[in-house]
Image (cartoon, grey):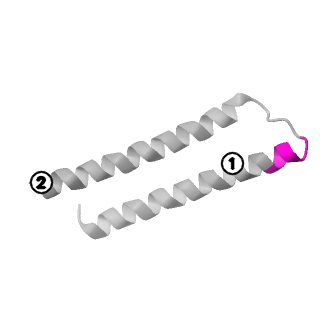
Amino acid sequence: MSREQFVAAMRQEMQEICALQIMLKNLQKAEERGYETSDANRLHAIADLFAASNESLLGNYFKIKNEADR
């Protein structure tokens, strides 16, 4: 994976993280207005998305590292 590919992968990950942050902010605003969350599944889904994003980023890092070591 070239540097440009790595940068593109990092940008995609940052877009996903920004989208997740927006979801969390919206959830916080709804709770501040007195709304209860529909259920814990939404929070678990957000946590799963963050974990998947992190795993994806680490996977890309190790791909690049392995290719660089060859």
Identify the residue at image location x=54%, y=37%. 48
Quadrant including the N terminus: bottom left
* Residue 23 falls left or right of residue 69: right
Q: Residue 17 placed where, x, y %?
A: 54, 54
Q: Residue furthest left?
A: 70
Considering only vertical position in the picture, is 3 above or below 46?
Answer: below
Identify the residue under disc 1.
24
The amino acid type found where label 2 is placed reads: Asp
Identify the residue under disc 2.
69
Residue 33 in the magenta stretch? The answer is: yes
Magenta segment, principal secondary structure? helix
The amino acid type found where label 1 is placed reads: Leu
Identify the residue at image location x=15%, y=58%. 68
Q: Where are the magenta residues, as a range?
A: 29-34
Q: Residue 36 placed where, x, y %?
A: 85, 35
* Residue 19 falls left or right of residue 4: right
Secondary structure under the numbered disc 1 in the rendered image: helix
* Residue 27 falls left or right of residue 3: right
Considering only vertical position in the picture, is 2 above or below 37?
Answer: below
Q: Residue 42 placed where, x, y %?
A: 68, 36
Q: Residue furthest front?
A: 32
Quadrant including the C terminus: bottom left
